[in-house]
Amino acid sequence: MKRPVVSVMRRISMLSLILLPLGFANAGQGDDLLNARCAGCHDLKGPAPTTVQAIWERKGPDLFYAGNKYRREWLARWLQAPVRIRPAGMFYGNHIKPGPDGDEIDQGSLAPHVKLSGSDAELAASALMDKKAKSDLIKPGEYHSGTISKSMGELMFDKFRGCLACHEIEPGYGGSSGPEVYTVAKRLQSDFLISYMRNPQAWDPKIFMPNKHLKEQDLPKFVDYFKVLSEEDFK
Ligand code: HEC
Ligand code: HEC
């Protein structure tokens, strides 16, 4: 009874090899590339760290919900020409040293990011966009663009909410423990930004960005402000 089963199985697998659609083959290649060259520093599977210690030791941002977070065209571009996003690395405590004017960033401790060829960057970007964990936190289309003046945005971000303590709003101006926000509108999807600011810990339970319980009506205004900043084109 065993033999026919084996031969049928063999025939099916031969057939699937021949008929494997190109897109599917590419998706497999993209995942292979991520596993071989990225998994050493990035969590591609989840779940997010559940201890503060694991946050300190994280080597790169979690990518298992990349498809809900990044703009695909930004991913493909950045992976070919990566530039720093977090001025003091993943955890600033690991990359600051005492200087004459207080703590300064130890640039020598921050390694440049791996750079991909154009075709590998496209493969990686596609495979990353398929990673859609935590979709329940995204309300597709909830962001509607509005307008805000730069000074009003700055007032909210800096004075009222104290976000500037951890985020730069232009190169070299603002805190260095979080990612720069003057490029964030180009990097990340608007609906993700709203969801993340609503509750950072829903995405990353132990992240040290405080939940400021921002008003629902203010969430899109922050995104509008990030868009204003991104038009300044510092980089
Ligand atoms: C040696 C560790 C290391 C390896 C290997 C690595 N990365 Fe990274 N990656 C990092 C670090 C650290 C950052 C944060 C850079 C910053 O903020 O300036 C990062 C940032 C990123 C970002 C931006 C994420 C964000 O939220 O800001 C993407 C996308 C990314 N990496 C993808 C990849 C891909 C794809 C590969 C494999 C081809 C890869 N990385 C390999 C360490 C690594
Ligand atoms: C105590 C420091 C701190 C404060 C204050 C803070 N953040 Fe953050 N923020 C962080 C950290 C840390 C992250 C996540 C970093 C990561 O993913 O590597 C983050 C992530 C973000 C992101 C996603 C950016 C990205 O590139 O992934 C946005 C948007 C953001 N913060 C907005 C805000 C706003 C708006 C405020 C004020 C209401 C604020 N933050 C206050 C530390 C802070």
Image (cartoon, grey):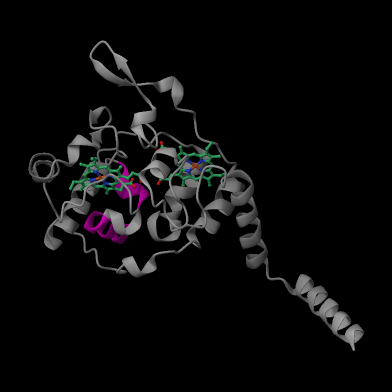
Image quadrant where one finds the N terminus: bottom right
Nearest the viewer among 196 and 227 is 196
User: In this view of the protein, can residue 10 be seen by the observer?
Assistant: yes
Nearest the viewer among 4 and 183 is 4
Residue drawn at the location 45% of the way across and 27% of the way down? 110
Residue 41 relative to residue 181: left or right:
right
Residue drawn at the location 80% of the way across and 79% of the way down? 12
Q: Is residue 196 magenta?
A: yes
Residue 198 relative to residue 117: left or right:
left
Q: Is residue 132 magenta?
A: no
Q: Position of residue 11 (x, y in %)?
A: 84, 79
Q: Position of residue 137 (x, y in %)?
A: 32, 66
Q: Position of residue 118 (x, y in %)?
A: 58, 45
Q: How many marks?
A: 0
Q: Main secondary structure of the magenta part?
A: helix
User: In this view of the protein, can residue 87 be seen by the observer?
Assistant: no
Q: Residue furthest top?
A: 100
Location of residue 129 with respect to 152 vertically, above or below: below
**Magenta extent:** 183-199
Location of residue 73 with respect to 173 vertically, above or below: below
Q: Position of residue 126 (x, y in %)?
A: 53, 58
- Specify the quadrant of the image occupied by residue 164: top left
Image quadrant where one finds the C terminus: top left
Location of residue 211 with respect to 179 vertically, above or below: below
